[in-house]
Amino acid sequence: MAKHLLGKEVTAAMNEKLQARVAALKEKGVSPKLAIVRCGENPSDLSYEKGATSRAELIGVEVVKFVLPEDVTKEALLAQIDAINADDSIHGCLMFRPLPKHLKADQDEICNRLAAAKDVDCMTDLSNAGVFTGKKLGFAPCTPQACMEILDHYGIDCTGKKAVVVGRSLVVGKPAAMMLLKKNATVTICHTRTKDMPSVVKEADIVIVAAGRAGVVDDTYLRAGQTVIDVGINVNEEGKLCGDVAYAKAEPIVEAITPVPGGVGSVTTSVLVGHVVEAAMRKNS
Ligand code: NAP
């Protein structure tokens, strides 16, 4: 039976450290604050917002919400971002994406309007560049960083290990590969054009799966001794949340695995709040 890498154990340790940092900031008269910008009432945005708000409150980070109508104009949204950039009491900003359909063509311009120093959810090009250059330009994307937090918490050393990332999106797969590289793993990225993916994944010591396809990685891809981090969030035929890894088939084989739910997802919000605390620390250092 595999070791279960549990999000709640990772977040408990992270939250404790973050609470201490917030206390130190408050002693200096700094109160970290997160702005949340939401256009419309998308249920998955609302659900993430609820989780992020309660995690922020638990850690001592203030949250201010800016709820705009679904049909908000580009100009009004840019003005909202400008106001957040200009507000010295706000340290970080989360804006839900994708934006409403009528703003799709302008999404890049709108995202890049946010000051990188407040870009705690990696929506600007500068933040993305930081992941690849290793420079502190903005902040890394929360989900792949959550994967690294899990590896770190459980003392899983990546140095010299073979790592495979399934998925090459800019929000998860590519940055996860860069982060594993930074940890001195030898990294391979798989995608829909990869040939003989089961053999490639079987070679890996560490597997991060972010394909967005329920159960795409099953026992035929896995072997004993592997650590498997499942980023996927899907709803199965019974209406239940499940990952990209066929958990029931994988769990008896591998050395360690994250469950879904209860794995990466719950760590992501602590990473987001951690970025707000870090933004406040950078501003006041
Ligand atoms: P995405 O933009 O749809 O990218 C999926 C990637 O997986 C693509 O690169 C695609 O390859 C690859 N892929 C899809 N099917 C594949 C297959 N059968 N074999 C090999 N590669 C395959 O998705 P994403 O935004 O990265 O998200 C991935 C998953 O993570 C989703 O389930 C999402 O809900 C979840 N997620 C979780 C969190 C969290 O906090 N836990 C946060 C964000 C996302 P191509 O490039 O060749 O198309």
Image: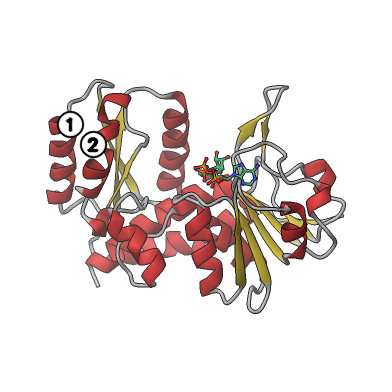
* Residue 147 found in image quarter: bottom right
Q: Is residue 164 left or right of residue 57?
A: right
Q: Position of residue 282 (x, y in %)?
A: 27, 68
- Residue 118 lies, with reference to residue 27, above or below; the image says above
Viewport quadrant of the C terminus: bottom left
* Residue position for label 2: 106
Q: Is residue 170 left or right of residue 235?
A: left
At horizontal 77% and vertical 58% (from top left) the residue drawn is 199
Q: Amino acid at mark 1?
A: Lys
The answer to whether the residues at label 2 and label 1 have Cβ atoms under 8 Å apart is yes
Give the residue type at disc 2: Asp
Q: Quadrant of residue 278?
A: bottom left
User: For numbered disc 2, what is the local secondary structure?
Assistant: helix
Q: Secondary structure at mark 1?
A: helix
**Which residue is at 73% across, 22% downward?**
238
Neighbourhood count class around disc 1 (C-alpha, 10 Å): few under 14, some 14–19, many 20 upward: some
Residue 55 % position (x, y): 46, 45
Give the labeled residue for mark 1.
Answer: 74
> Is ligand 1 less than 8 Å from the beta carbon at label 1?
no
Nearest the viewer among 176 and 149 is 176
